[in-house]
Amino acid sequence: MMNTIGAAIIGCGAIAPLHARAIDAMEGARLVAVVDIDPVQAAQSAEDYGCEGLTDYRQLLERKDIAVVHLCTPHHLHAEMAVELLKAGKHVLTEKPMALDVPSALEMQAAAEAAEGQLGVVFQNRYNEPSVQIKAIIESGSLGKLLCMKGLVTWTRDADYYTGSSWRGRWATEGGGVLINQTIHTLDLLHWFGGGIASVKGSVTTDVLDEVIEVEDSAHACINFSNGVRGLFYGTNAYQTNSPVELELVFEQGTLQQRRDSLYLWQDGQETLLCGPQGSSTGGKAYWGTGHSRLIQDFYAHIREGCRFWIDGTEGIKTLELIAAIYRSSVSRKPVLQGSTPLASHGFSHLH
Ligand SMILES: NC(=O)c1ccc[n+]([C@@H]2O[C@H](COP(=O)([O-])OP(=O)(O)OC[C@H]3O[C@@H](n4cnc5c(N)ncnc54)[C@H](O)[C@@H]3O)[C@@H](O)[C@H]2O)c1
């Protein structure tokens, strides 16, 4: 019989139910405790999931019956919590972004390297069927070489979304706006598809919520990958609806387009549907994608088998570096070269 892995979730807000349901649906895993600094939230979630409710995550550190901890807290808390938990021997699965900025992410990475536990980052869109197929087509070379690609995210977040939150919209707690919170998944996909980055030129702006938030609500980037591929990116929270993310990848022998969560191949004057949208098994908003349960299952499978989970600190840091480069370039109005020190700390909030 399979040993049961005990789990805890810290932060019982919007995203926590997806984690709780994914743990519940997994054979050999049990949600032992939920933690929230708000006692009402902790008690309510404990009742909902039939587990213990705690208000201080440090109560998890000595618990022998909890091996995996899911971080579903605001961005500025990920690093501190992950470092403490990794030092205490826990496996940590953190929601995106891995941390508020690159230096904090590097601290997490160092703690993970020194620890027995694993550190995983929730980039669940890598598990979407279109993403899996795109990556396989790039790697197999079945459409020839990848030439260029674009990613477009046009979503809406109104003033209430920010004023109703204690941490969103501020540099100190969210670490940025649309780039680090909403479009980080698309930037992660572009990075995953394109590989190493040579240079990034980008800009950020607050088109609509200038009076409400410190951070940007819109951004663009021109990403030059080391293999010669150029990736164009535009993301905004200033649209008036949440449109499906659009991706296009142009290859020597055909073009892939992701529209409405379906993947199409355009080749020789004909369009073919490669895969359609998939239902969500864990609920949640459509624009969060359906990959949470698959990613969480895969994280636990890696723990069980004792092999390193593939979306680890290294992967989390790459995307944070890309975001830092866009902020930096927005200030300098120059391309930011990969490997140059500014990628480590964009200092955007201080430069404004
Ligand atoms: N992967 C995705 O698609 C996706 C979607 C939504 C949110 N997220 C991420 O999930 C994380 C949480 O976002 P959310 O929308 O659920 O936020 P939220 O504000 O709804 O919930 C955060 C919860 O953390 C609790 N909290 C704050 N400080 C705490 C502390 N010190 N100890 C314990 N609990 C504390 C709050 O009381 C709140 O209940 C963020 O990193 C966010 O970017 C990811």
Image (cartoon, helix red, strand yellow):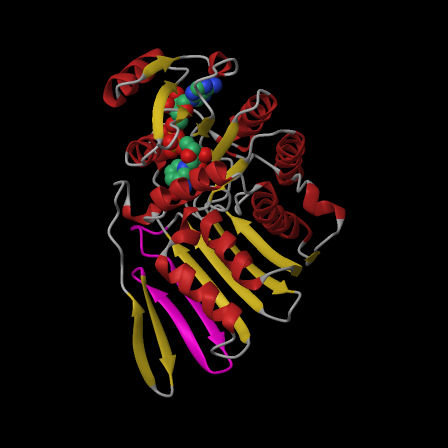
- Which residue is more in the foreground, 208 or 148? 148
Task: Tell whether 48 sits left or right of 34.
Answer: left
Q: How many marks?
A: 0
Task: Give the position of the C terminus as an image quadrant.
Answer: top right
Does the magenta run of residues contain 245?
yes
Does the magenta run of residues contain 115?
no
x then y, percent, for residue 29: 36, 30
x then y, percent, for residue 128: 37, 55
Q: Residue furthest front?
A: 1
| Residue stretch rendered in magenta on the structure | 239-261
x then y, percent, for residue 348: 63, 41
Image position of 143 with respect to 175: above or below:
below
Image position of 230 with respect to 96: above or below:
below
Quarter of the rendered image showing ligand 1: top left
Observer able to see residue 44:
yes
Task: Give the position of the N terminus as an image quadrant.
Answer: top left
Residue 46, quarter of picture: top left
x then y, percent, for residue 307: 54, 42
Observer able to see residue 209:
no
- Which residue is more in the foreground, 330 or 100? 100
- Which residue is more in the foreground, 78 or 70? 70
- Which residue is more in the foreground, 49 or 327? 49
Q: Residue at x 52, y 16 (%)?
A: 61
